[in-house]
Image (cartoon, rainbow, N blue to C red):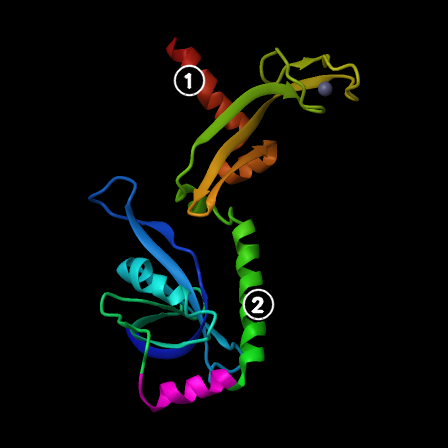
């Protein structure tokens, strides 16, 4: 495991999140508090910012103090960070990481001096980080695994509908019939499975009710409406 110590100017502290780590001893995994902090340093040439994933007690405890230090571009130090190259370069805290909110020494003093001289630059960097974070928050459903990891109330509604206008039909799946909606453009409509997926996304900032229709619901759930419909109703009818 590659380890690094870093000093940097705090630009951004993310609100606390919970992720679910796999744990064989506990169903559904283990809850792990985490948040990202973004730091700047005169030496991070080209990239300019460094993102560090902070876990467990450091995320719930020390990071709370850190929030009040963002405005003043304070210098902090972190020891024993794990370096990973899985998804580009990343740093995360380990069991041995210490977070020093008032580091001393020559390097820390130099960095503090640099931060005073570059306040405008740091402000624009921070704004860029905040903008990026907001756009990530909007695109919450990046992957199925992200989605499954969320604490949500969810509901799937399945029905049979016209393949053209989506109006409810009363014929068996695959049956050709005349659509009941007078404005439907189909001369003959086919009865197909339709799915609506409604759920609440919940995080510490609040909850958000989301409704996904048809193909979008299929994409997120990773299953075709027809397949799910057949699983739901054909198995039941066989058992009955
Ligand atoms: Zn129709």
What x and y, as percent, mark residue 70?
A: 45, 69
Vertical arrangement, residue 78 with respect to residue 112, above or below: above
Q: Residue at x 37, y 79 (%)?
A: 7
- In terms of secondary structure, what is the magenta stretch mainly? helix
Quadrant, the C terminus: top left
Instruction: Specify whether residue 112 is painted magenta.
Output: yes
Rendered residue at 30%/41% (across/down): 28
Q: Quadrant of the N terminus?
A: bottom left
**Element under disc 1:** helix
Q: Are marks 1 and 2 in contact (CB under 8 Å)?
A: no
Residue 10, percent from left and from top: 43, 72
**Residue at numbered disc 1:** 235
Is residue 54 placed above or below 42 in the rendered structure?
Answer: above
**In this orientation, which residue lies closer to the viewer: 169 or 9?**
9
Q: Earlier in the sequence, mark 1 or mark 2?
A: 2
Camera-side residue: 132 or 145?
132
Give the residues drawn in magenta, as a range.
104-116
Residue 218 at least partly seen: yes
- Binning the other alpha carbons within 10 Å of mark 1 as few (below 14), some (14 to 19) or many (20 upward) gives few
Give the answer, above or below, for where 196 lies relative to 36. above
Q: Which residue of the protein is positioned furthest toward the top in this rendering? A: 240
Q: Which residue is mark 2?
A: 127
Specify whether tag 2 is near ligand 1 (CB below 8 Å). no
Q: Tell me the SS state at disc 2.
A: helix
Q: Quadrant of residue 76?
A: bottom left
Please state the quadrant of the image where ligand 1 appears.
top right
Residue 105 included in the magenta stretch of the image = yes
């Amino acid at each position: 495991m590659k380890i690094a110590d870093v000093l940097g100017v705090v630009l951004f502290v993310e609100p606390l999140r919970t992720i679910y780590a796999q744990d064989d001893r506990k169903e559904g995994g283990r809850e792990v508090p985490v948040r990202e902090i973004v730091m700047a340093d005169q030496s991070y040439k080209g990239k300019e910012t460094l993102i560090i994933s902070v876990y467990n007690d450091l995320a719930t405890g020390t990071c709370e103090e850190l929030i009040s230090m963002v405005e003043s571009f304070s210098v902090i130090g972190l020891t024993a960070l794990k370096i990973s190259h899985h998804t580009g370069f990343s740093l995360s805290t380990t069991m041995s990481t210490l977070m020093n909110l008032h580091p001393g020494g020559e390097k820390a003093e130099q960095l503090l001096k640099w931060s005073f001289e570059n306040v405008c630059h740091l402000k624009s960097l921070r704004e860029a980080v905040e903008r990026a974070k907001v756009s990530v928050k909007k695109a919450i459903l990046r992957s199925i695994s992200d989605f499954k990891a969320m604490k949500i109330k969810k509901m799937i509604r399945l029905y049979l509908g016209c393949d053209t206008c989506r109006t409810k039909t009363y014929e068996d799946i695959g049956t050709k019939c005349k659509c009941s909606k007078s404005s439907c453009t189909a001369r003959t409509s086919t009865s197909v499975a339709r799915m609506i997926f409604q759920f609440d996304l919940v995080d510490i900032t609040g909850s958000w009710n989301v409704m996904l229709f048809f193909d979008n619901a299929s994409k997120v759930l990773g299953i075709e409406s027809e397949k799910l419909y057949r699983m739901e109703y054909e198995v039941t009818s066989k058992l009955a």
